[in-house]
Image (spheres, grey):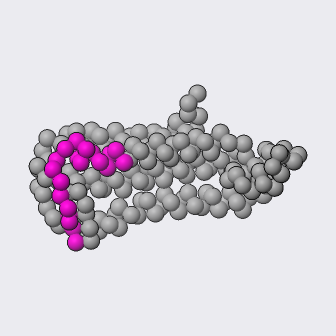
Amino acid sequence: MVLSSPVRLWLLPNAALLTALSVWGIVRYPHLPNRIPQHIGTDGVDAWTNRSIGSAFMLVFVHIGVTVLLTACAELTLRVTPSAELPDSVAPFGNGLVRSSLNRPRTRASALWTARALLTLNACVGMSLLIGCAVLWRSAPQREVSGWLFTAMLAPILAGTALTVASAVRDRRAPAH
């Protein structure tokens, strides 16, 4: 099995976001102006580019890449042997080195918690990119963007990051056995 059951279930929101972004982009693409935003700075759009599949769907491609990366991290987190299940016998390089040099979850439950946090972070990144697409896919080439844009794009990522960090801290504070 390529993806374990907990990963598949928690990928559903991410798949829905990717589908919604893709469908929305496909519908919007023919109506986009010839020049679309390439970069948005503090003063609004400060760089433009010609409309193309690559430029119009860049944020969708970024979300696909982040989804692949975070899904792989979540899956590997679930597949690694938790530190509580490692044998107490001395490993070839010393038991202390094996336990401290590998960043392992302490238990299977904490591995599941961390995997879910990573997939939630991915959904938060997707929501942030959804907001970016709303600016990118406007019908008219406007330089101005709302003052709340930076906060609106950063807030979901910060929330997902806080959840992921909380998961790691929770794992480190849990007893080893």
Is there any visible trace of residue 138 in the rendered image? no
- Based on the displayed image, in which of its 4 quarters is residue 45 positioned? bottom left
Of residues 144 and 88, the one drawn nearer to the viewer in this rendering: 88
Identify the residue at horizontal 62%, vertical 50% (top origin): 113
Task: Classify residue 157 as left or right of residue 5.
Answer: left
- Judge whether 44 appears above or below 62 on screen: below
Of residues 69 and 9, the one drawn nearer to the viewer in this rendering: 69
- Based on the displayed image, in which of its 4 quarters is residue 65 positioned? top left
Is there any visible trace of residue 14 in the rendered image? yes
- Residue 162 in percent (x, y) is at 53, 62
Task: Classify residue 177 as left or right of residue 134.
Answer: right
Q: Residue furthest right?
A: 89
Task: Classify residue 176 as left or right of residue 5.
Answer: right
Asked if residue 102 lies in the magenta stretch, the reply is no
Asked if residue 54 lies in the magenta stretch, the reply is yes
Read off the magenta span.
Answer: 43-62
- Residue 149 in percent (x, y) is at 29, 65
Identify the residue at horizontal 78%, vertical 54% (top origin): 97
